[in-house]
Amino acid sequence: MAELHDLTALEQGALVRRRAVSPRELVDHYLERADRLDSVGAFVTLTPEPARERAGALGDPGPDAGPLFGVPTAIKDLNLTAGVRTTFGSAAFADFVPDVSDNVTLSLEAAGMVSLGKTNTPEFGSPCYTEPDVAPPAVTPWDRGRTAGGSSGGAAAAVAAGLVPVAQGSDGGGSIRIPASCCGLVGLKPSRGRISGSPMYGDPVGLATAGPIARTVRDAAAMLDALAGRRVGDPAWAPPPSDTFLAACDREPGRLRVARFLAPVITDTAVDPACVRAWEDASRLLESLGHEVVDVEVPLPREAVATFETCWAVLTALSVVPPEKEHLLRPLTRWLSERGRAVSGPEFGLAIGAMRRYAAGALEALAPYDAVLTPTLATPPLPVGAMRDDAHPEADFEAQKAFTPWTSAWNVTGMPAVSLPLHWTDDGLPVGVMLAARPAEEELLLALSAQVEAAAPWHDRRPPRW
């Protein structure tokens, strides 16, 4: 007989609405698992008593209860959560407790979800691995000696290990899709403007957005429904969907034109044969489903890389730390911040303009296609510490670029993109493939992803110690 954590988030929500299980029972179930089984570095801070109080206060679901009402989740340690320690993955903020919640936290609460605490993230969400100084490394439950990816590594580890059924991540250069690939999950980066950055609006470039990490496409779509929407004051927003994103999963996508390319976007790096095989197998699967798959050139020029790095360094420098605590920052953060502070205001403005022109060129090149297929990562999940190099932060940064040479392209263009767990290596490591769609076309992307999942299901795969 299936246990609660074997069920999808939507199945658990259905049990709550039928009153077959209470939100408090779900919370207790997952808190016990998190306390007993978090050998994957999923959580920085667990909040058992507030979670139980909130679950109890929800009461019975009303007729308007959403599909995730009463379902446990967790919030990334980059997102403000009133009254809950929020470290931003940094020892410099180890004791910081905000007095306000941001849009992500408020949206999940409004959907009736219950957070069990804060998930692990690297310092300020910058690296593509999760090895902060405030918590143990986040590792994939498929091999606990290997990285869960980053920066939403704790969220992905929590979902993959069955410590929560679905979790929120954020993605400025791949930080949802990278850990999804490492942990054998669905990770969706929505379109620019789909989810509000209120109240901080901390990314003036427009690279970063929140998004869902889940074990199924439908669970991811349901969480996107909970997160999506504009708030008064947003500088820009994506047009609303025609229906719910969850409903899009039940549509036939029709015959699509799918562009594909294998060449890395941001660095001349070798691609592991397992990642090539995953991409080739996904191409054949799409063709078997009736889609046309077309080889195309890389849509972004190599010159865009330096522009992206300029913006990334400035964004890191915007994470201001009190001077007396700067010595607590990791060498990578200090190195990137120094690069960012060396950029003048006019130089930063020119970089943003250049990046928007590069994005426009890529969108024009890809306009004839309904979706784009690439690998998610250049290798399966690497051992913990393989990329981190505190003695040589510039080498650390180059290793990260070699690990994830495609994901940031869709942050530049603002396109929605999803990593799907379609492949496993012979020794049991997950390998994701990535699909992207035109801006604001999450519905089509979800319809296609659901079709792919139905043809090659993965939900019944379980990591060790499940």
Image (cartoon, helix red, strand yellow):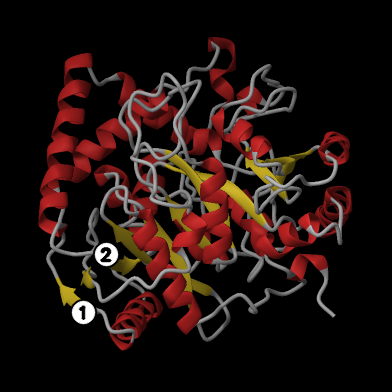
Mark 1 residue element: strand
Query: Seen in the image, is 441 located left or right of residue 268?
Result: right
Residue 70 higher or lower than 295, as above or below? above
Residue 74 higher or lower than 430, as above or below? above
The residue depicted at 77 percent of the width and 65 percent of the height is: 5
Q: Quadrant of residue 269?
A: bottom left
The residue depicted at 83 percent of the width and 41 percent of the height is: 55
Judging depth in this view, the residue of 35 and 365 nearest the camera is 365
Query: Seen in the image, is 38 located left or right of residue 383?
Result: right
Q: Quadrant of the C terminus?
A: bottom right
Q: Which residue is mark 2?
A: 371
Q: Which residue is mark 1?
A: 292
Residue 343 in picture, x, y percent from top left: 24, 21
The amino acid at mark 2 is Ala
Residue 123 in picture, x, y percent from top left: 54, 35
Callout 1 crowding tier (Cα within 10 Å): few <14, some 14–19, many ≥20? some
Callout 2 crowding tier (Cα within 10 Å): few <14, some 14–19, many ≥20? many
Disc ID at residue 203: none
Residue 258 in picture, x, y percent from top left: 23, 71
* Gap between marks 1 and 2 measured at Cα: 10 Å
Query: Seen in the image, is 99 located left or right of residue 451?
Result: right
